[in-house]
Amino acid sequence: MNQATAAGPRPRGAAASPALRVRELTVSFDTPRGPVPAVAGVSFDLAPGEVLGLVGESGSGKSTIGLAALGLHDPARTRVGGSIRLHPAKGSGGAQDPAGIEVVGAPEAVLKRVRGARVAMVFQDALDALSPFHTVGAQLAEAYRIHHRDAGRREARERAAAMLERVGIPAGRAGDHPHQLSGGMRQRVVIAMALINEPDVLIADEPTTALDARVQRQVLDLMRELQAETGTAMLLITQDVGVVAAVCHRMLVMRSGRAVEEGATDRLLAAAGHPYTRALVGAAPTLRTAPGSRLPTVEEPDPAPRRPAAEQERPEPAVLAELDGVRVDFPGRRTSPLRRGRPVPAVRGVTLQIARGETLGLVGESGSGKSTIARVLAGLRRPTAGAVRFEGRDISRAAVDPRLRRELSREVQLVFQDPYASLNPRRTVAEIITTPLRIHTGLDAAARRNRAAELLEQVGLSASHLPCYPHEFSGGQRQRIGIARALAVRPRLIIADEPVSALDVSVQAQVLNLLMDLRAELDLSMLFISHDLAVVRHFCDRVAVLRSGELVETGSRDAVFNAPRAPYTRELLDAVL
Amino acid sequence: MAAPSPAESPELRPAAEAPGARHRGPLAAALRAFRRDRTGMVSLGVVCLFALLALAAPLLAALYGKNATEHYGQDTPGLLSPEGLPVLPNGGMSGEHWFGVEPGLGRDVLAQLLYGMRTSLLIALASVAVIAVIGVVVGITVGYLSGAVDRAFTFVCNVLLAFPTLLLLLALSPVIQTRFVGPRENEPAWMQFTVLIMVFSAFGWVPLAMVLRTAVRSLREREFVEAARAVGASRRHIVFRELLPNVWAPMLVHITLAVPGIVTAEAALSFLGVGINEPIPDWGRMISRGSEVFYDDPTYMVFPGVAILVFVLSFNLLGDAVRDALDPRTLR
C-alpha cells in the first residue's frame, strides 16, 4: 500500500557498467502484408542489481523486448536491429570479452550458452512454462545440468532441492508434478528455475498477472527478496503500475513500440512529464481514488469531475433481487459409468440482496464461486438448494424452464469478462445486438436496426459499426458491444462478471467511466463481480466478500474498506499494491 | 456520453487496410486467402474441369461421335486382332478413337472415361451430401447436448469405426444380388448406386460427426453461447445461429477431403468386382480390365489410372488449400 518505500534502495554504482545495454533496438515482424514494426528504436541500460519496470499497454512492444534480449525471436519471421549487449558480472566467469556479448545477430550456439545462464526468463503462465510430464525437481535439476555439464545427477538434485527451499517450497515436494502445485507455487518453481544458474539478468514477463492478489503479493515479495540477495538485475515487464511501484527502482514507459518516458519510479508516479504516463498511472483506481469519480484516460488525462447527481437520496431501497441460502454443487468426477461422482460445492449457503438502483460489488479470489453466483442469478444455473428471487418471484428454476428464463432475461442481463469469447466471431455486430430484440420484442427488422444503432451510440461507438464483425474491433470496443447487447432490452439488473479484468488499464478506465455514466443515465441496478478491490471500491455502493463459496463480509463500501471486520477482508486489502 | 475514443479508433483494422472490402466476414476473408493460393486455384480449376466434363459427357460424346457402350472393335474390322487386342499401336489410338479401344469388347476408351467420371462423381457427391447432413446434425446435436447422449454416441461411433468396411462391402454385394434380384436378371443400376452410396454414408459420417462434436464441445464453453442463453435464446437458435456458422470451416475441409477418398474407394470396389457392374462405365473396372491385359496392351491401364490420379490429387490439394484458407491463423 505504501508505494514509495516499497522498492529497496538503489544499487550502488548503477551507471558504472550496465548488466544489459540496449541501444536503438528495432524489431519488426514479417506478415503477408509486409513488415509490422513492434519495437522502434528503444534504448536503455539495466545496471547490475537494478530492477527496471517496462510498462505499457498490450501491443506496446514490451514483451518483444524481453524476447529479443534472449534472442528468442524466430529469425525467419522477425527482423531484429540495433544492439543488445550483455556485460557479465566479474565473478561469474565465462565471457572474457570486455565489450560483453552481443545478443542481436548472435549464432545459436552463443545464445544457447546465454539463455538460462546469463539471462533467464520468468513467463506469465507457469503452467505453460513447466512440462506436465516431469516432476518440478527433475525440471530444476535439468535446468542446472544444462549449464553445469560436469555436475552429477546427485549434485543437481541437491541444488534443485535447495533452490525450492529458497523460494519457500518444502524440498519434499520436489517429486510433485506441476499440476499438483497451486498457481502461486508453480510461479515460485519457475522463479527458482530462472535463478538456479545465478543469471546476471532476470527478465520477468508479467510474472504475477495470472495470480490472485494475495499470492501476487507473496510472489512479488519473494522476487524482490531474491533479487536483492543475489544482486541479479531484473527487467520486469508489466502493465500494472501498482506492481512497478512495489518492486522497481526505475521505470520505462512504452507506447506503440517507442519509449515514452524513463525515470525513477517515485518521480514518474508522483509527477510524470508525459501525459501518457500520467494517464497510465491515474487510469487504474487505487484505494485512495475518490469513489465514483471519472477516471483519467489516455485521451482525457484530466477529466471533469462528475456531477454529484449520483449521490441523490433514494426514496425506497426496495429489494430487487435476492439469493436466500443458495447452495450450488458441481457434479464431481465419475468414478465409474454407473455411479455419480461426489458433488463438489462451489457456493455454500449464500444470502445476498440487491436493492433497486444499487450496485453491489462481489469480491473474491479465483474459485471462490463469484461467477457461479452470477450464473445462478441470471438463471443460467440451477442452485442445488436455496431460493433465488427477482422482484419477489422465485426464479431458481429458470435454468431448466425455458419460458421462465426467457421472461427473466428480459429483466436481467449479463456482461461477460472476456470480450473476445463472448461475441460470436461469425455474426455481425448488428446480428449480435439485435438478437435480444428479436427474442423479446415485436419490433420489425428496421426498428431493431434503429435501436441497435441507438445502443451503439449510447456506448460510444457509431451506427457505421453495425455491419462489422467482432474481429475488427479492439478489446475495449468489443466490451462496449457486449454492454450494448446487455442494454438492448432495457433490463433492470445488469450482472457484470469481471467486465474490465481482461482489458488494458486505460481501456478499463474508459469502460468503467462508461458503465458509471450508463448506470446514472438508465437507473440500473448492478451486480459487479471483480477480484480487484480498488475497482470495486471505486464502482460499488455495497460490497460482499466471498471466500470458497461462503460470504465472509457484507456491508457498505465505506464500512468494508475503512473498517473491515473479517480478517480475510483485511488480508485482501493488505495485498492490494 | 463518451465519444468514440481516438485511441481505439485506429485499431479498427479494416478501415486502415482495405477500404474497399470493409466488414468482411470470416468466410469472405477465407475466400480472399484462398484466391491468393495458386495451388488451390489450379486444383479448383482442375476439379471444375472434371465436373464440367462429367456433366457434359453426353454432349461431348455426341460431338466426338462415339458412345460408351457400343463395341466398335467387334463391329468394325481392322480394329481388334483375333485375340481381342488392338491392332494399331498404343492401344489402338487413332484419329477415330483418340484414346484407343478397349481390348476384348472394343469399346471407345475416351467415351468410357467420360462416362466413368460421371459414375465416380455421382457416387462421391451423393455420399458426401448424405454424410454432410448426417454428420452435421448428429455432431452438433451431440456436442451441444453431451451427457448420456454423448456417451451413447461415442459408443456407436466406436462400433462403426471397428467395422471392417471393405469386408462388409464385399459380403454385401452377393447378399443383395441373391436377396433382392431374381436369378435371371441383372441388378438394376439404381440399386448398385444406392447400395454404394448407402454404405459409404453409413460409415462416412462418423469421422465428420466426431470432428464437429469436438468443435462444438469447445465452442459450447465459449462465453458467446452462454451470452446467447443469457439473452433468452432458444436451444434451436443457439444450435443453428450461434454454433452452426462456427463449424463451416471444419465441415468444408472434411468434405473436400472426403470426396477423393470415396472416389478411390469406389474404384477399388469396382476393381474387386463388387462395385458398379457392366455395362455402366467405371474407372475401377477399367483398371481391373487393364491389369488383365497389361502385358499385351499397357496403354489401356494408363488412361483410367492417370485420370484417377489427377482427379484425386487435385481434390486433395483443393482440400489442403481450403484448410489453409480457413485456418484461424491466416484469418488472424
Image (cartoon, rainbow, N blue to C red):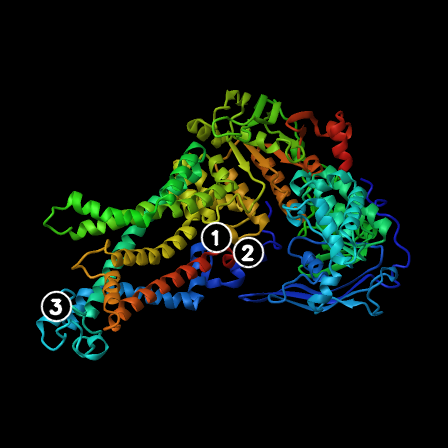
Which residue is under mark 1?
Answer: A468
**Disc 3: host chain:** B
Residue type highlighted by circle 2: Leu
Question: Where residue A473 appears, x then y in whole percent?
Answer: 54, 52
Is residue B86 left or right of A168 when viewed as pictured? left
Residue type highlighted by circle 3: His
Which residue is under mark 3?
Answer: B71
Give B258 or A257, whichever is nearer the viewer: B258
Callout 3: SS: loop
Q: CA distance from mark 2 to mark 1?
A: 10 Å
Please rate how many residues cluster around mark 1, counting C-alpha atoms within 10 Å: few if below 14, some from 14 to 19, many from 20.
Answer: many
Which label sits on residue B12? 2
Q: CA distance from mark 3 to mark 1?
A: 62 Å
> Where, by quadrant of the figure, is residue A202 drawn?
bottom right
Residue drawn 77% across the image and 30% down it: A562
Question: Where residue B325 appears, x then y in whole percent?
Answer: 45, 59
Is residue B177 left or right of A198 when viewed as pictured? left
Question: As displayed, is residue B112 above or below residue B186?
Answer: below
